[in-house]
Image: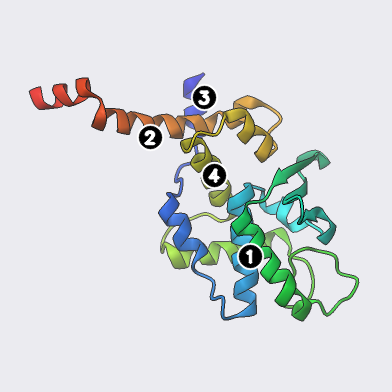
C-alpha cells in the first residue's frame, strides 16, 4: 500500500514561501490584479479544484458564515470553510472590481473575466499558470499546485487527514492519504536533525 500512495504523490509540492511568492504576483493596483489575487487566495485557502472555482456562483459564497458551497466531481456538493485572508480579498474584489467587470447583468459567476463572463476551465488554468511561472520561472503546474499545497501545509500544521478528505471532496480516504507521505518526509527530516539518537549516530559517523 505505501508504494501505491507514494506513486501518486504530487511531484513538486510548493513550500509556504513559494506559495506566498505566487500570491504576491498580481498587481493590486490593477483591478484585474485584485481579482486574480482573490482567486489565488481562494484556491490556496480551500483547496478547491479549477473546475469547482469556475462553477462558483455569487450565491455560493456565504460571507457571514465564511463558507463556500462547492459542486465537485459527479455533481457532489460540499460546504468548505474560507479563511479570513481569502475572504478579505474576495470582499475587496466584490466591492470594487466585479461591478466594473459586470457588463452583463444576468451573469452570476462569482469570478468573471474582462469580458464580463465567467471563466472557462482552460482560461482560468492558463491565467494561474502564468502567475506561477512569474513567481517561479520554469515551474510547471497551475491550480492543482495550490490544491496540493493547501492539503500538505494543513497536514504539516496538524490537521487530521479525515478533515483534509472532507475539504478536498475525496470520496475515499485512500485518495487523501497520499498527502500523509509528504508530511512523513518532513517529520523524518526533523527527526534526523533533532533526535538525540540520530545526532549521536551522525557524530559517530
What x and y, as percent, mark residue 135? 44, 65
What x and y, as percent, mark residue 160? 57, 29
Dot 2 or dot 3: first in sequence order is 3
Cα–Cα gap, marks 1 and 4: 21 Å
Q: Which mark is residue 4?
A: 3
Task: Read off the residue under disc 1.
Answer: 89
Where is the C terminus found, in terms of image quarters?
Answer: top left
Q: Which mark is residue 139?
A: none
Dot 1 or dot 4: first in sequence order is 1
Task: Read off the residue under disc 2.
Answer: 186
Cα–Cα gap, marks 2 and 3: 19 Å
- Could you tell whether 43 is left or right of 107 in the image? left
Confirm or deny contact between disc 1 and disc 3 (CB under 8 A). Answer: no
Task: Read off the residue under disc 4.
Answer: 148
- Residue at coordinates 79% horizontally, 54% vertically from top-left? 62
Cα–Cα gap, marks 4 and 3: 18 Å
Callout 2 secondary element:
helix
Q: Nearer the viewer, mark 1 or mark 4?
A: 1
Dot 4 or dot 2: first in sequence order is 4
- Residue at coordinates 64% horizontally, 78% vertically from top-left? 31
Q: Nearer the viewer, residue 3 or 161?
A: 161
Amino acid at each position: 500500500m505505501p508504494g501505491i500512495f507514494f506513486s501518486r504523490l504530487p511531484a513538486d509540492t510548493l513550500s509556504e514561501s513559494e506559495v506566498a511568492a505566487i500570491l504576491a504576483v498580481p498587481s493590486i493596483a490593477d483591478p484585474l490584479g485584485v481579482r486574480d489575487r482573490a482567486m489565488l487566495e481562494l484556491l490556496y485557502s480551500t483547496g478547491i479544484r479549477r473546475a469547482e472555482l469556475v462553477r462558483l456562483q455569487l450565491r455560493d459564497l456565504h460571507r457571514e458564515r465564511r463558507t463556500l458551497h462547492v459542486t465537485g466531481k459527479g455533481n457532489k456538493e460540499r460546504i468548505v470553510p474560507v479563511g479570513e485572508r481569502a475572504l478579505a480579498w474576495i470582499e475587496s474584489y466584490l466591492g470594487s472590481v466585479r461591478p466594473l467587470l459586470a457588463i452583463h447583468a444576468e451573469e452570476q459567476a462569482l469570478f468573471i473575466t474582462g469580458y464580463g463572463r465567467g471563466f472557462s476551465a482552460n482560461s482560468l488554468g492558463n491565467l494561474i499558470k502564468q502567475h506561477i511561472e512569474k513567481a517561479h520561472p520554469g515551474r510547471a503546474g497551475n491550480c492543482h499546485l495550490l490544491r496540493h499545497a493547501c492539503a500538505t501545509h494543513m497536514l504539516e500544521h496538524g490537521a487530521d487527514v479525515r478533515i483534509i478528505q472532507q475539504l478536498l471532496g475525496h470520496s475515499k480516504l485512500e485518495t487523501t492519504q497520499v498527502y500523509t507521505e509528504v508530511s512523513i518526509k518532513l517529520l523524518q527530516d526533523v527527526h534526523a536533525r533533532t533526535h538525540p539518537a540520530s545526532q549521536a549516530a551522525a557524530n559517530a559517523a
